[in-house]
Amino acid sequence: MSYFTGSGNSICEIRWHGRGGQGAISSAQMLAEAAYGRRFQGVTASPSFGAERRGVPVTASTRLSSEPVRIFSQVEYPDVVIVLDETLLVTANALSGLNSGGLIIVNSPKKPEQLGLPHDYSIATADASKAAKQAGLVVSGFAMVNTAMLGAFARATEIISIDSLERVLSKRFSSGARELNYNAACLTYEMTQLLRSNSGN
């Protein structure tokens, strides 16, 4: 994929947009873990700072590289943006700084072309909320979409695989919780739809 060249000092910069309680920061870390060793020797994950009350918009950042990464600041000009709540496209200005030809992955039941986003971005959508509910990944009445969206990232970019994600989930969760999270990620992987940008990427 064009989101990472895999050569030289190229870095794939990823920014997560979610709401407090959705697990954006945890997923940023799990993505780094899943990518490490799968041709990526340099990975970092950085949380945003500030209020992280439930429902408040939060961001997190992941950087992936074939070389060591020594940057720990928040990503301002991402190659990929992952949005856990579709409303954040507007309310949190999730597209801010997204590089032309970049990729945005949105938790949405809509098709990519139905989001009304600029055509100089590639757009992927997946109903991660539905997948999480189908998998039984619901906490206090809320579908937990963060690990489900890792499945969408894997399908849209091919940067990580479902197998590498399963290994990370096995380290992070007990067997029962691992199965729920893995099933949600697999369901989301299968339902991901990708519309490529007009820029040729």
Image: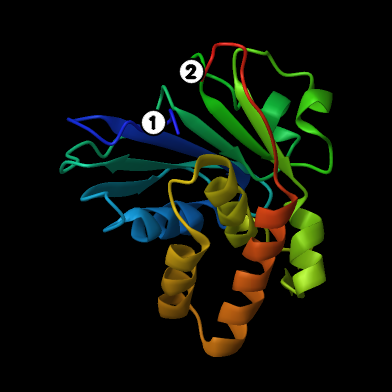
Do the residues bearing badges 2 and 1 touch, measured as CB atoms within 8 Å? yes
* Residue to which mark 2 is pinned: 97
Mark 1 or mark 2, which is nearer the start of the sequence?
A: 1
In the rendered image, the quadrant that contains the N terminus is top left
Residue 166 placement (x, y as % from top left): 49, 71
Residue at the bottom extreme, as displayed? 175
What type is the residue that disc 1 sits on? Val
Q: Secondary structure at mark 1?
A: loop
Residue 29 lies, with reference to residue 12, above or below; the image says: below
Residue at horizontal 22%, vertical 33%? 7
Disc assigned to residue 75: 1
Residue 38 lies, with reference to residue 158, above or below; the image says: below
Tell me which corner region of the image, top left, top right, bottom left or bottom right, holds residue 92.
Answer: top right
Q: Is residue 52 visible from the viewing direction of this image?
A: no
How many labels were placed on the picture? Answer: 2
Say few, some or many: other residues with alpha carbon within 10 Å of mark 1 (under 14 / 14 to 19 / 20 or more).
Answer: many
Residue 129 lies, with reference to residue 174, above or below; the image says: above
Q: Secondary structure at mark 2?
A: loop
What type is the residue that disc 2 sits on? Gly
Residue 17 placement (x, y as % from top left): 58, 39
